[in-house]
Image (cartoon, helix red, strand yellow):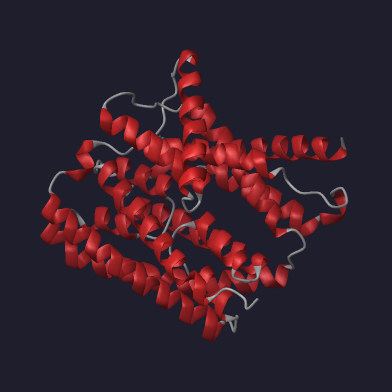
Amino acid sequence: MRHFLTTLGLLALSALAGLGAARLGLPLPFLLGPLLMSGAVAILMPDRLPEGYLFPPNLRLVFIAVIGLMIGAQVTPDLFFGATRLALSLGALTLFAILAHGLGYAVFRHLGGYDRATSFYSAAPGGLFESIAFGEEAGADPARLTLHQFLRIIVVVTCLPIGLSFWLGGPVGSAGGMTLSKGAVPWSDLPVILLAGAAGLVLGRLLRLPAKQLIGPLVVAALLGLSGLVHLDIPQWLVNLAQIVVGTALGMRFTGLSRGLILRGLGLTLVAVAGMMTLSAGFALLLSGALDQPVDVMLISFAPGGVTEMALVALSLQANPAFVTLHHLFRIVITVLGLGLTARFFRPAP
């Protein structure tokens, strides 16, 4: 019972933190607010938690599926127009993912002094959940790995929208009031959403997809939309609730981390992300003319941040969010494939 009440209490505090972050205009407020709140509890007050407490993993998995549905619902036939230009862009994105991963690995391995597995999976420029899962299987330090993967996203989705806001003279992304979900979705649509999520979880398990709880529902939502059978509209309150649960669960992974470790991790992440964003800017400048896209749109398409927030920034720039979303989904897929193909080189000896 104490564990159940602790979970309810954490979620209540996370909801308040999400609302506060939204009032402050932070990017991804209902993910970052709960993450920062629960992370603070885990780091500063671990003795206040019941002995042996773990955030319920099945609860997290259910709401990760909701996020997968929301992302998959953005996949439309419009994504695949202009195949030649798209092939050029995605080919360049593959090269970017390889270079960014190598750059991050060099930072964590040589500047941070981490072991090979921790350096490799901490440096992955996408696939947050997958990187953590593969890294834990390979014997990477779970605390440092989780810290660096989340700091990467936090730094990118915070600094890039703020930087663009100063450059363009107005707020962008969620700070500008943009959203990818629908607020007035009728309650009668919820059974369809639940069935699609359940089907996605089953599909992910049967096909043994990487990050099956995310990718399975994403594939189902995308197939439903592309086939014209059903276009899933995920209500904003459900997306917010999913982010609160996921942010709380992941923040609790920082239990027992010292402030020194966090500050050092932040410094290393800033160096790695600065290098990745420099690469992003270089690719954006090179591809802008060939693809007939503004430099800022190409920059957010290549930035190693969150799918949702980068698509929201695209909406603020009056760009095509489908174009940006496809690039981020592709970056995640390429990164996850790379992690899967190289996993055997990092598995601990039996």
Q: Quadrant of the N terminus?
A: top right
Residue 174 at x, y percent in the picture: 43, 40
- Residue at 66%, 47% (x, y): give it: 249
In the rendered image, the quadrant that contains the C terminus is bottom right
Can residue 170 be spotted in the picture? Answer: no
Residue at the location (44% across, 23% down)?
183
Q: Position of residue 28 (x, y in %)?
A: 50, 44
Q: Is residue 202 above or below residue 188?
A: below
Q: Judge from the rendering whether residue 148 lies leftward or rightward of residue 141; answer left or right.
A: left
Is residue 91 shown left or right of residue 219?
left
Q: Residue at x 57, y 61 (%)?
A: 132
In the displayed structure, 328 sits above or below 112; it is: above
Q: Position of residue 101 (x, y in %)?
A: 42, 72
- The image shows residue 46 at horizontal and vertical percentages of 82, 55
The answer to whether residue 113 is seen in the rendering is yes
Q: Quadrant of residue 263?
A: bottom right
- 78 and 339: which is toward the camera: 339
Query: In the image shown, does 331 or 33 lie closer to the viewer?
Result: 331
Q: Nearer the viewer, residue 335 or 169?
A: 335
